[in-house]
Image (spheres, rainbow, N blue to C red):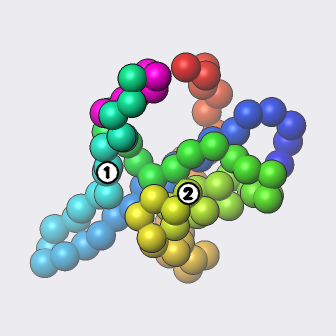
């Protein structure tokens, strides 16, 4: 992965009884967090062991919701987006 600050999220879909659901959580309330209490997708900051953005999203998804994201579950990538750090 290139040098710099990177983060990634996963958009988790589940189909059940002809309905499509998406996994969205709520961030923990914390007074020092500008996104405290906001809705969020599973994801987070890159760690040194992450080689790709997929690695970041997969690791964070396991940590946050316990779902292992295997290669055969992937639909695709939305690409990279440069964002300002809050």
Res. 26 in view: yes
Secondary element at image label 1: loop
The answer to whether 3 appears left or right of 53 in the picture is right
What residue lies at 16% left-to-right and 68% top-to-bottom? 19
Of callouts 2 and 1, which one flags the residue occurring earlier in the amino acid sequence? Answer: 1
Callout 2: few (<14), some (14-19), or many (20+) C-alpha neighbours within 10 Å?
many
Q: Determine the image quadrant of residue 64.
A: bottom left
Q: Position of residue 67 (x, y in %)?
A: 45, 72
Residue picked out by circle 2:
60
Cα distance between the residues tagged 2 and 1 = 14 Å
Q: Picture coordinates of residue 23 (x, y %)?
A: 32, 57
**Residue at image location 61% in from the left, 22% down from the top:** 85
Image position of 81 with respect to 8: above or below: above
User: What residue is pinned by disc 1?
Assistant: 24
Q: Position of residue 5 (x, y in %)?
A: 73, 34
Membership of 39 in magenta stretch: no
Q: Nearer the viewer, residue 86 or 78?
A: 86
Specify whether 55 is left or right of 33: right
Camera-side residue: 25 or 81?
A: 25
Q: The residue tagged with tag 2: helix, strand or loop?
A: helix
Q: Left or right of 27: which side holds 59?
A: right
Residue 76 seen in render:
no
x%, y% of residue 27?
Answer: 36, 40
> Magenta region: which residues?
32-37
Farthest residue to the front: give it.
31
Disc 2 vs disc 1: which is toward the camera? Answer: 2
Residue 12, quarter of picture: bottom left
Q: Main secondary structure of the magenta part?
A: loop
């Amino acid at each position: 992965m290139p040098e710099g600050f990177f983060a990634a999220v996963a958009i988790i879909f589940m189909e059940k009884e002809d309905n499509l659901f998406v996994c969205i959580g709520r961030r923990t309330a914390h007074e020092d967090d500008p996104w405290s209490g906001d809705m969020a997708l599973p994801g987070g900051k890159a760690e040194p062991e992450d080689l790709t953005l997929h690695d970041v999203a997969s690791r964070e998804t396991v940590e946050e919701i316990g779902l292992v994201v295997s290669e055969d579950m992937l639909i695709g990538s939305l690409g990279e987006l440069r964002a300002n750090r809050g």
